[in-house]
Structure formats: structure tokens, C-alpha cells
Amino acid sequence: MAVSFLPPDAVLVTNYINGDEQALAQLIERHQAKIYGFIYSKVSDRDVADDIFQDTFIKVIRTLKTKSYNEEGKFLPWVMRIAHNLSVDYFRNNKKMPIQRDTEEFSLFSILQDSDPNIESQIIGNQIESDLKRLVEELPADQKEVLIMRIYQDLSFKEISEITGVSINTALGRMRYALMNIRKIIEKKNLILSQ
């Protein structure tokens, strides 16, 4: 019985550094869907996502070629952090914030739940959703980032900590403060977020 052996990322990285170009192709193929999906979830534009994906791997190649890679076998979180930073740079350089799109399964804080929405409740629902997005925009950048990654992108706190380069406790704290701050803003502005 033949067992196919897939070398771990760390072995492929070492092989690539030692001149095996095919090793990099295997790494890209192995992680392409996850990395590209992550970038696209941030920028919501295929052309921009393609560019950032390419820039991510240009940076990966440069780092590996200069032998300055030192992530102790954590290749994917390292690449995701590069992709995350390049996505942030894209918005910083273009001075626009990402538009977050809800999925049908999850709408921010699960506030909007109406199995048979008529046109009036749809309009009210859209207004509530719009109000919530404005509230999220008022949060400090680090809190907003964790909240969006957790709620919109459904990432675990472990994934968030690896991508942002902070501890899990810091990511949890930022989420807690984000929710507390949103509650404070709702109370201060006397908003009613219900249908």
C-alpha cells in the first residue's frame, strides 16, 4: 500500500531556501485558497485581492531568499500576517475603509431576525445595519479590526492573534472593549437598535 507523503511546511521552506523552486510552488498551492480568501474578505475586490496576493508572495520570496525567515515552522500564520499588513497598507494608501458584507448566516450581533420581512421591516433592518456599521467605524482601529475579524470573517481568537501579532488575551481584551464601547455609544446617542 503506497502512502503519499506530504512534507510539512517547514521542510518545504528549507528546501526552497536551499534552491528547490518546486517547494515554493507546493507551499503556494497548499495555502492559496486560505490566503486569497482572507485577502478577498478584507478588500472585496478581485483585482485588488490578486495584487495583494502577488505582493504577499513577492515579500515571502524576498524574505526567504535573504535567509531572514525565522518563524519556527509557523509558515501560514507568518504569510497571513504579511497579507494582513499589505491589506491594511492598501486601505491606508487609498484612504478608504473596507466595506464589510454580511453573510446570510450572520448579521452583525444577530440583531436582525425576521423570517417574513415585509418592505417596512426590511427598510428598518437596513437602517439598523447601517447604524451598527457607523458605530463600528467609531471604534479605535485595533478594536474595530478584532471585531471585524471575529464577527464578519468568523476567525478564532487564536487566528486573530496570529494574524495581528498580539497575544490571544490581547485580542480577547480588544473584542471586550469594542463591545463595551459600542454599548456606551448606543447609550450616549440614545439609539434604539430593534425592529
Image (tube, rainbow, N blue to C red):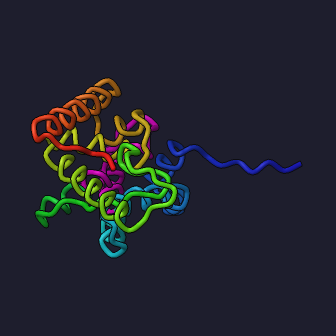
Does any portion of residue 28 appear in the rendered image? yes
Predominant SS along the magenta part: helix
Residue sitting at x 33%, y 50%? 195
- Percent position (x, y) of residue 146? 29, 40
Query: Looking at the image, which residue is at 30% across and 71% down?
Result: 48
Residue range highlighted in magenta: 58-86
The question of residue 79 being in magenta is answered with: yes
Q: Say left or right for 53 vs 141.
A: right
Identify the residue at the far bottom of this view: 47
* Front residue of 137 and 55: 137
**Which quadrant holds residue 125?**
bottom left
> Measuring 38% from the left and 68% from the top, which residue is drawn there?
119
**Most extreme residue toward the top, as rendered?**
169
Q: Give left or right: position of 92 versus 153.
A: left
Choose top left, top right, bottom left or bottom right for residue 183. top left
Q: Is residue 101 magenta?
A: no
Quarter of the image for residue 8 reads top right
Q: Residue furthest right?
A: 1
Q: Position of residue 130 (x, y in %)?
A: 24, 57
x then y, percent, for residue 104: 47, 58
Q: Is 182 left, or right, of 46 in this rendering?
A: left
Along the line of sight, the residue nearer the viewer: 188 or 155 = 188
Q: Number of callouts in the render?
A: 0
Which of the two residues, 102 or 52, is positioned nearer the viewer here?
Answer: 102
Q: Residue at x 22, y 38 (%)?
A: 143
Seen in the image, is 83 located left or right of residue 192?
A: right
Q: Position of residue 100 (x, y in %)?
A: 31, 58
Q: Is residue 179 above or below residue 14?
A: above
Task: State the residue in front, 30 or 95.
Answer: 95
Residue 20 visible to the viewer: no
